Amino acid sequence: MLEELKEANNYIVGKIEEKDSLILEMEAFALEHNVPIVTKEVAKYLEFLVSSYNFKNILEIGTAIGYSGTIMGRIAKKNNGKLTTIEIDETRYNEALENFKKANLLDSVNLILGDGIEEVKKIDAKFDFVFIDASKGHYMEFFNDSFERLTDDGMIFIDNIMFRGYLYKEYPKRFKTIVRRLDEFITYLYENHNFVLLPFGDGIGLVKKN
Ligand code: SAH
Ligand code: MG
């Protein structure tokens, strides 16, 4: 992004004023405890998409404290649908459970404690929206397992696909495998799917089945 645009973007994102107290509480918690929740503009876009398409049956891989899950779960509930969301870390899982309780979403959320790689394979259901936001080294696998369970008019939303720009610029050595896999994943998506990459937040990938 152009430097000028980056500054303009920061200015504009500053206009997003959140009023919901639970969402505000989760944002403050995430900031304090370094939980990598979606950025505000990504949260807005996620809400915009899910509500515009009226998605009902939503799968999320990577719940963390249930921030994006609350945003999507509220819309799924309104549409008489359900959010299934998977988190590998027990502490985060418990925090998410508390937050879904506070959001009065326990009847519309199926929160799973486990590894997305195994848990998605166990699911015998179709989803019209999948939000992939977990370990980036496994995105290809999350994607393929999700795509198999995607309805014909469904959409997959992949967060952090640009991984802080490391696909392009120099990166810490420990990220070598993740960077290579993400790079191959993006090439694969362009070649094989109806895919767009939106370079805001940490990079968003969108795949539409039909
Ligand atoms: N979607 C959340 C943020 C998720 S952060 C939001 O925007 O509010 C990524 C989360 O994925 C972390 O909590 C991490 O513990 C979890 N995670 C990492 N690898 C995972 C895996 N293989 N399966 C399930 N969850 C995983
Ligand atoms: Mg993310």
Image (cartoon, helix red, strand yellow):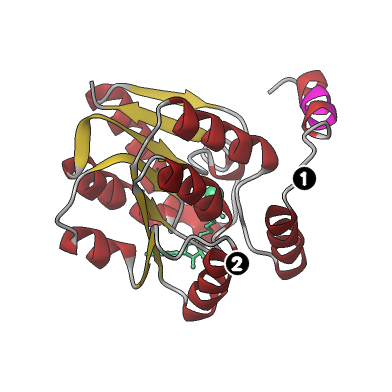
| Crowdedness near tag 2: few (<14), some (14–19) or many (≥20) residues, C-alpha within 10 Å | few
Q: Nearer the viewer, residue 131 or 57?
A: 57
Up-down relation of residue 124 to residue 90 (above or below)? above
Up-down relation of residue 103 to residue 98 (above or below)? above
Q: For ligand 1, tell me if the residue under mark 1 lies within 8 Å.
A: no
**Does the magenta segment cover residue 136?**
no
Q: Amino acid at mark 2?
A: Lys
Which callout, 2 or 1, points at the residue further toward the start of the chain?
A: 1
Q: Nearer the viewer, residue 168 or 162?
A: 162
Up-down relation of residue 203 to residue 153 (above or below)? below
Q: Position of residue 154 (x, y in %)?
A: 28, 32
- Residue receiving disc 1: 19
Left or right of 78, for residue 123: left
| Label ID, residue 167 | none
- Residue receiving disc 2: 102
**Which segment did they paint magenta?**
6-11
At horizontal 22% and vertical 40% (from top left) the residue drawn is: 147
At horizontal 68% and vertical 41% (from top left) the residue drawn is: 40
Q: Position of residue 3 (x, y in %)?
A: 79, 23
